[in-house]
Image (cartoon, rainbow, N blue to C red):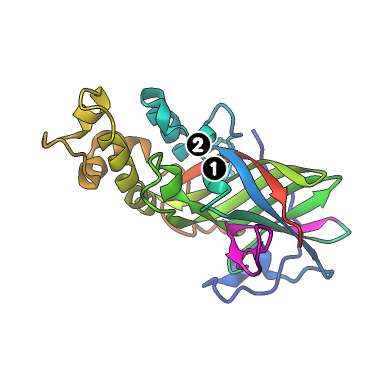
């Protein structure tokens, strides 16, 4: 289990989009002119046997509620598995980027967000830099950072049919542990989404997927509460099984220990990313 707790006293300039920037490690300025390197995710997998379960709330226990939910659905319906089907979307309509701002002395800040096109070509993208960055170190090609925000394409991750859009969703408690190898970045990252937001985003794509299963499929039959042949988002959202597996397992806290919100659903990914050339 990775526990990323090595952080520096420095951060970035105040983030005007953060309602309380003083509560972030990313508040104080870095002590250098940082160099930014941007990577595009090319593969990732939330399956618990492969994704390191990160301790996002620092309570000594690994967190990965949505990863375990993914595994529960996949165990019944293998087509739901993200790892094998998602690289195609990462290469096309889901430009998911990691930006590292680093100093020669090892200070590092990390942003994980959707890509914003700024020039022609696949490499002509950057992250918007409006989220609080994770704070940590980059030394000997090892990256470790925590206490950031990120955006996750939550709807796309739960949409094997590719019909429900992307559904970029903000998450807190960004934690990353990775290694730089030549022009690649490989490792783990995770964050946590407000449990009600997670349930609201996931119900519709899961309902569409279950409806697409054969009429004799036991999962589809069980989920179709009114027996009309269509599994609705409301039927998924109201089911005890869905609420049990999409649960709030963490409370993300500020550096001083104050809770930033209510229960959140954690998720961890094993990933690889390729450096963008600009």
Neighbour tally class for label 2: few under 14, some 14-19, many 20 plus, Cα within 10 Å: some
Q: Which residues are magenta?
A: 106-128
Residue placed most toward the observer, 138 or 61: 138
CA–CA distance between discs 2 and 1? 7 Å
Looking at the image, residue 156 sits to the left or right of residue 94; the answer is left
Looking at the image, residue 119 sits to the left or right of residue 220; the answer is right
Residue of label 1: 88
The part of the image, by quadrant, that contains residue 99 is bottom right
Quarter of the image with the N terminus in it:
top right
Q: Is residue 168 magenta?
A: no
Picture coordinates of residue 16, whole percent (x, y): 58, 77
Residue placed most toward the observer, 271 or 160: 160
Above or below for 25 versus 159: below
Above or below for 155 versus 242: below
**Label 1: which secondary element:** helix
Picture coordinates of residue 195, whole percent (x, y): 38, 49
Residue of label 2: 85
Residue placed most toward the observer, 32 or 113: 113
Q: Name which residue lies at 23% across and 38% down.
A: 239
Picture coordinates of residue 245, whole percent (x, y): 36, 35
Q: How many marks?
A: 2
Whether tag 2 and tag 1 are in contact, CB under 8 A, the answer is yes
**Label 2: which secondary element:** helix
Picture coordinates of residue 193, whole percent (x, y): 45, 51
The part of the image, by quadrant, that contains residue 235 is top left
Q: Is residue 112 magenta?
A: yes
């Amino acid at each position: 289990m990775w526990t990323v707790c090595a952080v520096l006293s420095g951060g970035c300039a105040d983030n005007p989009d953060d309602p309380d920037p003083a509560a972030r490690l990313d508040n104080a300025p870095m002590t250098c002119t940082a160099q930014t390197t941007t990577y595009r995710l090319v593969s990732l997998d939330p399956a618990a046997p492969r994704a390191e379960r990160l301790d996002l709330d620092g309570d000594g226990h690994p967190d990965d509620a949505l990863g375990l939910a993914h595994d529960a659905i996949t165990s019944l319906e293998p087509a739901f598995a993200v790892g094998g089907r998602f690289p195609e979307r990462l290469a096309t309509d889901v430009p998911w980027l990691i930006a590292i701002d680093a100093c020669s002395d090892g200070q590092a800040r990390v942003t994980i967000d959707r890509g914003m096109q700024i020039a022609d070509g696949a490499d002509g993208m950057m992250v918007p830099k409006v989220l609080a960055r994770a704070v940590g170190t980059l030394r000997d090609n090892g990256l470790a950072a925590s206490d950031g925000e990120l955006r996750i394409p939550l709807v796309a991750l739960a949409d094997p049919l590719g019909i429900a859009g992307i559904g970029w969703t903000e998450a807190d408690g960004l934690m990353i542990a990775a290694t730089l190898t030549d022009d690649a970045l490989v490792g783990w990252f995770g964050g946590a989404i407000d449990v009600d937001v997670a349930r609201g985003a996931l119900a519709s794509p899961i309902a569409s997927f279950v409806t697409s299963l054969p009429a004799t499929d036991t999962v589809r039959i069980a989920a179709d509460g009114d027996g009309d042949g269509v599994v609705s988002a409301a039927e998924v959202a109201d089911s005890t099984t869905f609420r049990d597996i999409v649960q709030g397992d963490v409370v993300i806290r500020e550096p001083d220990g104050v809770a930033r919100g209510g229960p959140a659903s954690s998720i961890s990914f094993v990933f690889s990313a390729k450096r963008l050339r600009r």
